Image: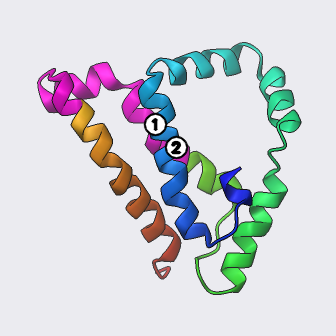
Amino acid sequence: MIFKEEGPLLDKIDRIVDRYVTVIGGNPFLPQFLIGEINRDPEKFVRILQNSGIDPNFLQRVIDKEVEAGNINPIQAADLIPNLIGMIIMPFAARPLFQTIFFQGDREKYDEYLNKRRKMVSAFIKQALTRNPA
């Protein structure tokens, strides 16, 4: 739904990251559950997405409009969305591993890291979208 709101795509990235982190932070087992359910019955999730009004063609049109305006580099929605969601979800899905390896098991420090990561993920995606290709 955020993609359907008015405004530049780059501004929407912040809201998307913030929303995902907030939802997953409040439901830390959601990523594992969803991945298990998607693998169990992928057609069910395709129907859910189709019935929810999510339209990958609409998103691609938003992206193409931004590219034509010179605001972002060309990218396919099929690349942007997995990159964005993967960067958000992986630290939650692999929390037991990352919390132990990088934060010596300290839950509070890992929570702080996840909260700070919101800005890092947004900045990383925005930089990838706007950096001049080599």
Q: Does the magenta stretch include residue 105?
A: yes
Towards the viewer: 127 or 7: 7
- Residue 67 is drawn in which quadrant? bottom right
Which numbered circle lies on residue 19?
A: 2
Dominant SS of magenta comes to helix
Lateral position of residue 39 relative to residue 116, left or right: right
Towards the viewer: 5 or 30: 5
Check the image and name the residue furthest to the front.
6
- Above or below for 52 versus 117: above
Lateral position of residue 91 relative to residue 111, left or right: right
Image coords of residue 54 (percent x, y): 80, 45
Residue numbers of the magenta segment: 84-110
Image coords of residue 43 (percent x, y): 84, 23
Q: How crowded is mark 2: few (under 14 residues within 10 Å), some or many (20 or more)?
A: some
Residue ID at (53%, 21%) = 30
Q: Which amino acid does label 1 sit on?
A: Thr
Residue ID at (79%, 52%) = 56
The reply to whether dot 2 and dot 1 touch (C-beta < 8 Å) is: yes
- Residue 109 is drawn in which quadrant? top left
Residue ID at (77%, 23%) = 42
Q: What residue type is labelled 2?
A: Arg
Q: Name the residue under label 1.
A: 22
- Above or below for 85 versus 15: above
